[in-house]
Amino acid sequence: MNEVIKLLKSHTSIRKFNETKITDEQLQHIIESAMQGATAGNMMSYSIIKIRSENTLSKLAKSCDNQPFIENADLALLFVADNYKWHKYFQQRGIPETFNDYSGPCISDFMLGTEDAMIAAQNAVIAAESLGIGTCYIGDIMEDYEYHKELFSLPKYTMPVALVVMGNYDTKPKVRERFDKQFVVFDETYPSITDKFINDMFSKEESNNADFSKKFYKRKMDAPFFKEMIRSIKLYLDEWS
Ligand SMILES: Cc1cc2nc3c(=O)[nH]c(=O)nc-3n(C[C@H](O)[C@H](O)[C@H](O)COP(=O)(O)O)c2cc1C
């Protein structure tokens, strides 16, 4: 197994950071690795906001569903799906006048911008991990549309899709198990998902906790943060035509 594969297979999220700072050189490698990720049409329909301010990290610890460990990170990178810059470019060059059907970024631009941003984010995560730096994604950045838009001065046609907090750490948690391959990776076509398939897929979780489905649903989908995420994402989607 080569070193990259070993690194990828030993991934764990890190939520407890020590005081050692990420160096400017390390940050440069992380950013440049992120930017070299594949990007649809080489458009780089995303922006990366570097957050080192303790004040902003502390605000994010609250606004991202009260997760205090965010405040203790050395830095956070915010990956923003961004169709605004290309939109401004098209406007400046008279595209709306030349092409009557142009009415601003559309839903496929949104999807491609989101994909670009996530690819850049994951490259940053891998680069950081290769330098021994711990990372954790924070999905709750997609909540509280109004607050996060204002906090980062985000214009229309931008959406914060991934916040990655980073820092050095002393101990690495155990690698978390994933579902077995048979439930995730299929040959050639999608299989028929039978009751047995579902029973087998969740048998490990349910053997430890018979009420797994209800408890999981209550903790995630039925929680206030999830409802807030739905509300917020709908507002972002409304910006795209
Ligand atoms: C899109 C996304 C959002 C996430 N949001 C959070 C979060 O808000 N808080 C957190 O502590 N972990 C978050 N995580 C980390 C997951 O909880 C973690 O990846 C998962 O439990 C598997 O654990 P591992 O990364 O250690 O293997 C997020 C991960 C992803 C990919």
Image: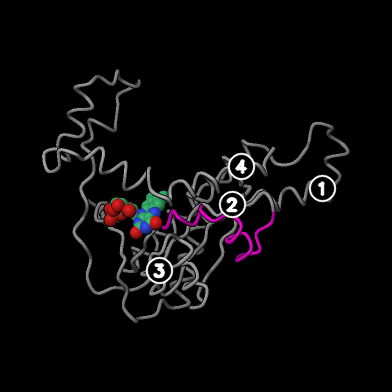
Label number found at residue 159:
2
Q: Is 78 included in the stretch rendered in magenta?
A: no
Q: Which residues are magenta?
A: 138-155
Circles 3 and 4: CB atoms closer than 8 Å: no
Residue 48 found in image quarter: bottom right
Front in this rendered view, residue 218 or 44: 218
Observer-side mark, 4 or 1, equals 4
Q: What percent of the width, then of the height, locates residue 218?
A: 31, 44
Badge 1 marks a residue whose secondary structure is helix
> Residue type at mark 2?
Met
Measured as percent of width and height from the top left, residue 203 is found at 15, 34
Q: Nearer the viewer, residue 177 or 198?
A: 198
Q: Amino acid at mark 4?
A: Leu
Label 4, residues with CA under 10 Å away: few <14, some 14-19, many ≥20: some
Measure the C-alpha gap from mark 1 to mark 2: 20 Å
Residue 70 shows which numbered tag?
3
Quadrant where the C terminus lies? top right
